[in-house]
Image: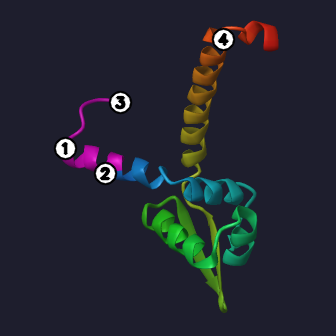
């Protein structure tokens, strides 16, 4: 991490990471990569239940990751902080490296790959 962060700043960082610690929220962010979608489309894209998807979208909005726009009775969501994808790419890249090194370390991995 850059520089020295206060305890309060560290708490904020931890809360922001905890929001991303839920698989459904990551699915929702992934679904929103293609652009703005309404709740119905996000339910279909993620396979979640409408109430559950709405709750996770509210959490993502409160954390500043997504924005909400109302149009009549519909609520539309879009990405508010595109930097979240860069963060996800870094984490996913680290996981890929970790899994690759584990696979290479397994006996017989060279014969299977």
Quick one: SS at disc 1? helix
Where are the magenta residues, as a range?
Answer: 1-14
What residue is at 67 percent from the left and 92 percent from the top?
A: 72
Horizontal and vertical percent for residue 96?
Answer: 64, 26
Q: Which residue is mark 4?
A: 104
Q: CA distance from mark 2 to mark 1?
A: 9 Å
Q: CA distance from mark 4 to mark 2?
A: 37 Å
Looking at marks 4 and 1 on the same chain, the residue that comes earlier in the sequence is marked by 1
Mark 2–mark 1 CB contact (< 8 Å): no
The outermost residue toward the front is: 107
Q: Quadrant of the N terminus?
A: top left
Quick one: SS at disc 4? helix
Q: Which residue is mark 1?
A: 7
Mark 4–mark 3 CB contact (< 8 Å): no
Q: Which residue is mark 2?
A: 12
- The verdict on residue 10 being magenta is yes
Disc number placed over residue 1 in the picture, else none: 3
Disc number placed over residue 65 in the picture, else none: none
């Amino acid at each position: 991490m850059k520089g020295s962060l206060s305890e309060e700043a560290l708490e904020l960082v931890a809360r922001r990471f905890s929001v991303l610690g839920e698989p459904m929220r990551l699915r929702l962010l992934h679904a929103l990569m293609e652009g703005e979608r309404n709740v119905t489309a996000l339910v279909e894209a993620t396979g979640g239940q409408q109430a559950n998807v709405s709750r996770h979208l509210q959490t993502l909005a409160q954390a500043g990751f997504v924005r909400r726009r109302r149009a009549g009775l519909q609520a539309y969501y879009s990405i508010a902080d595109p930097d979240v994808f860069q963060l996800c790419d870094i984490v996913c890249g680290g996981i890929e490296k970790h899994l690759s090194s584990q696979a290479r370390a397994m006996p017989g991995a060279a014969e299977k790959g």
